[in-house]
Amino acid sequence: MRDYKRLTIICGHYGSGKTNIAVNMALELCKIRENVAVADLDIVNPYFRTKDSEEDFKANGIKLICSQFANTNLDLPSLPADLYSITDDKETSVILDIGGDDRGAFALGRLSPEIIKENNYDMYYVINKYRPLTPDAESAYEIMLEIEAACGIKFTGILNNSNLGSQTSAEDVLNSLEFADRLSEISSLPVKATCIEKRLEDELKDKIPNLFSMKLQNKIIDG
Amino acid sequence: MADKVLMKGNEAIAEAAIIAGCRHYFGYPITPQTEVAAYMAKKMPKIGGTFLQAESEIAAISMVYGVSSAGYRVMTSSSSPGISLKQEGISYLAGSDLPALIVNVQRGGPGLGGIQPSQSDYFQATKGGGHGDYHLIVLAPASVQEMAELTIKGFDLADKYRMPTMLLADGTMGQMMEPVSLDEYSDIKTFDKPWATNGTKMNREHNITNSLSLVPEELEQLNIARYERYKIVEENETMYEEYYMDDAEICIAAFGIAARVSLHAVEKARKEGIKVGMIRPITLWPFPSAPFKKAAPHLKHIMSVELSMGQMIEDVKLACECCCPVTLCNRVGGMIPDPLQVLERIKEVNKEVNG
């Protein structure tokens, strides 16, 4: 992923891996752009947020735009006070991490007129074939349309993030390609990248074009 | 191998309930279990089921009472403060001998507490959170797969013994994502419910589900009969798992997320030559006293690892009958013990008992 627009919007089904992708994109983008920010507009999940990666961001000079209540355990669906800097500050490239499903995408709606007017964005639909409510391209497409309707912006590409957590094998990723291609066909959107955990890179780099290698941000409880 | 899906614990509960034949869910949102309701809201309308966000937890548990009376499998879910609100209804279910599955994805308390994981509703779940003499069957999963398994098992046990059953999880179990296989649960049991208030069709007397009994002699007999049934549950349905107990000198007692963390500590300690094992209760009521009673005379120390100020430890002590010292290793308020913290405690105990 080298061709970043000023705004990169990450949307998708609940639990499809959006926050992981947003964090990894920001860490990649800060190597090629000067001013980089991550905007956490997740109003759905108070448990796992981009703010968990705050130290990584600080070390790389990435600005974090998030609700003052993020990670305070105050369970409020609130938006950042500096929300409008996303569209006002044209010198900064922003990765937008949006909450899951149409309910999460609703929070993006108030920015959509400005985003569409500026027309310097990509909005990616994150999919995971192994999530129970999106086992096939048709059900993933249904959720995609719900998200577009909720935020008022059309997707420009698909990120195939099909995984089974830390137990994902190369074969699991390969078995998801057909699913992503089928969604690409019915939605007329390109599969922009296949997202994988870094440990699978060697096994998959010759088999899949446009790999996006990621470091996982999960909280560890299993020692 | 069966197909796997990546699920949150909360989603696994919801899907497993649907597999078990539950078509009626009533709830009220609260972190960290709201995904159960969200999943039901998406799925139930597609399969002809009922999802209803009630006006309160108390309304939800009362709707559970109604559907259970009619003989259908029914579930509600909440987290600690919400479960407190449901206690009146739970006591009524127990007093009317009605089956239902109640899910508690625990968070820190007391009061509103916080939204992070906890195990401090152990007393409430196992000792009768509502009024009167009664028990719930209490199941404690330690993985997302087990969330699904025990949800289905919970419906079966509830129907078999006409008892409300509680799945006692915590915020971590509810929120964590793991691969789950659900294909193997195709064989779902059904139970005759001749007591159900589903219409006489002019063929029988009216069935009544009721917890009001104004004649003391009769109420006494009802209580005694119920406890006879509880005895059968204790004899037949106690579940636990043992790890590295054959030659253990030190034993960890832990359930749910605490067991998960502790097992890593046990495995690390074993690598350092420390003879430590673990007993993981899966049913918290009936409590698996037998494995503790059997092991205690051969043990030098038992350590109860809990996300509470020490609740299960009382049952562990009772089971051991003073044969062995029992101590607590805990974190509270939404904090989770680190495997390394548990390992340090194991090393300290090992030093004490082996010099």
Image (tube, coloured by chain):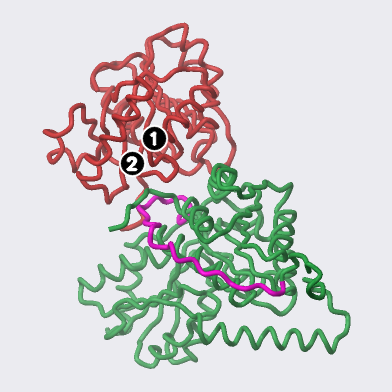
In the rendered view, tell whether residue B336 sits above or below residue B35. Answer: below
Colour displayed for chain B in the image of the structure:
green
In the rendered view, tell whether residue A81 sits above or below residue B199. Answer: above
Element under disc 2 = loop
Residue range corresponding to the magenta coloring: B172-195
Which residue has dot 1 on it? A19
- Please give the label number shown on residue B1: none
Identify by letter the chain in red.
Answer: A
B188 falls in the magenta region: yes
Element under disc 1 = helix
Residue at 38 percent across and 14 percent down: it is A121
x%, y% of residue B325? Answer: 43, 85
x%, y% of residue B272? Answer: 20, 72
Q: Quadrant of the C terminus of chain A?
A: bottom left
Which residue has dot 2 on it? A217
Circle 1 packing at 10 Å, graded few (<14), some (14-19), many (20+), is: many
Circle 2 packing at 10 Å, graded few (<14), some (14-19), many (20+), is: some
Tags 1 and 2 touching, CB below 8 Å? yes
Residue at 26 percent across and 32 percent down: it is A194
B18 falls in the magenta region: no
Picture quadrant of residue B62: bottom right
Position of B211 with respect to B14 (left or right) is right
Residue at 30 percent across and 17 percent down: it is A4
- Main structural element of the magenta stretch: helix, strand or loop? loop
